[in-house]
Amino acid sequence: MAGQEEKDQNIEAEKHNDERIEKMGQLTLDKNAQKHNLHLLTIIGEIEGHDNLAGNAKATKYEHILPQLAAIEDSEEIHGVLVLLNTMGGDVEAGLAIAEMLSSLSKPTVSLVLGGSHSIGVPIAVSTDYSFIVPTGTMVIHPVRMNGMVIGVPQTFDYFKQIQDRITGFVCSHCRISKECLEDLMMETGVLTKDVGTILVGEEAVSYGIIDAVGGIDKAIGKLHELINAGQTAG
């Protein structure tokens, strides 16, 4: 009887995990040899802001991510956060909000760029305690862009500059690249065919000081366990 009850509980737990992955791309990894509960957070597709994207678009909704990060900070059962990124960028305000929340977590955090972490995905990638990128992963660095009608007055361009400074300031304060070098990458004209900016692949992102190391899921999880162990020892 007890065995059947345990089996039913495991089935229910697996069903709950499947629903979390399907709805929010999140999962808590709580069965490992090092006794650490890791929370898996995925940033995929386009980062959705205040406007809903089309129903057929892959999107990360910031209204899902922010409450979950607050719950992680308040949880005694979760010891670290692993962030997987494959995003084309998206809403600047939403992306910066996620990045600020991640950077202010007291729990150890590690990010892993898979596929790509473009545009506003760059601040999210560097917001963690340590960052990895796979050898074929890409990062697109470009200036702020805006869709729709734009009023052609000096105040508009001043506002663009303020947004740009917020992004570059955050990125440079969370990785090793200088502001001058980052802005040079943003304004490069010889790389993207229809835009200004730069594409960095794998090791290039590390050599510029944006990402800490090249590696895959094994190194990312290993580093997260290492950070958790170091924090527990220090505590």
Image (cartoon, rainbow, N blue to C red):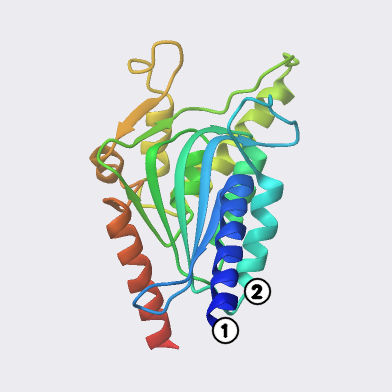
Q: Quick one: which residue is furthest to the top in this view?
A: 194
As drawn, the label of residue 74 is: 2
As drawn, the label of residue 156 is: none
Q: CA distance from mark 1 to mark 2?
A: 33 Å
Q: Which image quadrant for residue 111?
A: bottom left
As drawn, the label of residue 2 is: 1
Q: Is residue 9 left or right of residue 191?
A: right
Q: Is residue 88 left or right of residue 175?
A: right
Q: What amino acid type should be assigned to the residue bearing mark 2?
A: Asp
Q: Is residue 91 left or right of residue 127?
A: right
Q: Is residue 173 above or below residue 28?
A: above
Q: Is residue 130 left or right of residue 91?
A: left
Dot placed on the residue nearer the N-terminal end, 1 or 2:
1
Instruction: Residue 223 in the image: state x and y as whole percent.
Output: 32, 65
Instruction: Residue 126 in the image: state x and y as whole percent.
Output: 44, 51
Residue at disc 1, secondary structure: helix
Residue at disc 2, secondary structure: helix
Q: Could you tell me if the residues under marks 1 and 2 are in contact, i.e. CB atoms within 8 Å?
A: no
Q: Residue at x 55, y 61 (%)?
A: 14
Instruction: Residue 227 in the image: state x and y as whole percent.
Output: 37, 72
Quadrant containing the C terminus in the rendered view: bottom left
Q: Residue at x 46, y 69 (%)?
A: 108
